[in-house]
Image (tube, rainbow, N blue to C red):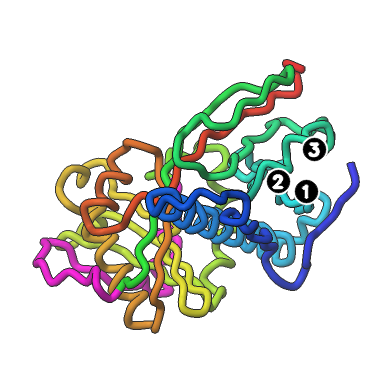
Amino acid sequence: MSRIIARPTEPALLDLPNLGSKSTEPSSKRVQSVLEVDVAVEALQHVARYDSMRLETYRQKENLANRICVSRIDSALALRFDDVGYFNRVYCADPAFLDKLPEIEAFYRGGAFGCELVAPPSEESGSVTITRRGWAPAHHYAWLHHPNCTALWSVKATPFDMRPPKPSERQQFLLAYLRAFEAQEDRIPGALRNMRHLFDRPELDFLMAWHGARLAGVAILMRCGDTALLCAGAAMPEFREMGCHAALLAARIRLASEAGCRQIYSWAELGGQSHANMEKIGLGLAGRTTTWRYSPEND
């Protein structure tokens, strides 16, 4: 497999298609829905930026050029990390990927994980169907957005104390992050080696939620100009359904606003608790995506 790193000095981006140019319907409802899908594509672009930034960081800092690949395949961005299945994703901003499926399959063939293809956002999940052998529908995601994060500030008191991790707490942060997202125990040492370098990224902010002396949750925010992305936030199992995740959302939104960001984006499992918490705090649903899992052994 050829090793291609897209833009090795900065995270790879997806070009945004002009989704509104194909419709001549005068309906204001149609115009509004197209604008919302445009926003969802922007959310997808920022998530792709976040994941490619992480891979580029690991590649450079841990000398993993022979294990990490980032490649543009037409308008899609394909990520491959031979050690971690999560990163094996294709982010698709438009339907052009449908003509490139053989190329996408070749990019992942020979690896241990196949890939998950994140289809373009639409008004309905399941709007894209892949009929080729080896592909099966996987997850349904919601893309979320608000144009003015200052308007989402919450002054509601919570029992959680929010603050960045001290240098001595960074490993504790990463361990909590990995276990909250159910990382396999045998993968944790390698993940710790890679992820420790993220603390050097100036565009990332890290928060720990404390309940007295106990760590209740962790979260990450990424900033890019006047835009922020809610990257990852999770409450520890014993603090779930106690408002910890909502408190982490509110704290990152305030942090983004104080840093001069206006727009804020995120994504979550469609209909899941994180999705519900984001809408409750004020983010709006901009689009839906069905992802497709490619398993080379099945093709």
Residue 192: % across, % down: 55, 55
Numbered label attached to residue 81: 2
Numbered label attached to residue 254: none
- Disc 1 marks a residue whose amino acid type is Arg
The span shown in magenta is 150-178
Q: Are marks 2 and 1 in contact (CB under 8 Å)?
A: yes
Closer to the observer: label 3 or label 2?
Answer: 3
Tag 2: Cα neighbours inside 10 Å, few (<14), some, or many (≥20)?
many
> Which residue is the site of mark 1?
67
User: On screen, 11 above or below 139?
Assistant: below
The reply to whether residue 175 is in sight is: no
* Quadrant in which the N terminus is drawn: top right
Which residue: 45% across, 47% down? 178
- Disc 3 marks a residue whose amino acid type is Lys
Tag 3: Cα neighbours inside 10 Å, few (<14), some, or many (≥20)?
some
Q: Secondary structure at mark 1?
A: loop
> Which residue is the site of mark 3?
100
- Disc 2 marks a residue whose amino acid type is Phe
Does label 2 or label 1 sit earlier along the sequence? 1
The reply to whether residue 262 is in sight is: yes
Which residue: 78% across, 48% down? 67
Q: Secondary structure at mark 3?
A: helix
**Does residue 98 appear left or right of residue 140 in this picture?**
right
Does label 3 or label 2 sit earlier along the sequence? 2
Residue placed most toward the observer, 100 or 37: 37
Quadrant in which residue 244 is drawn: bottom left
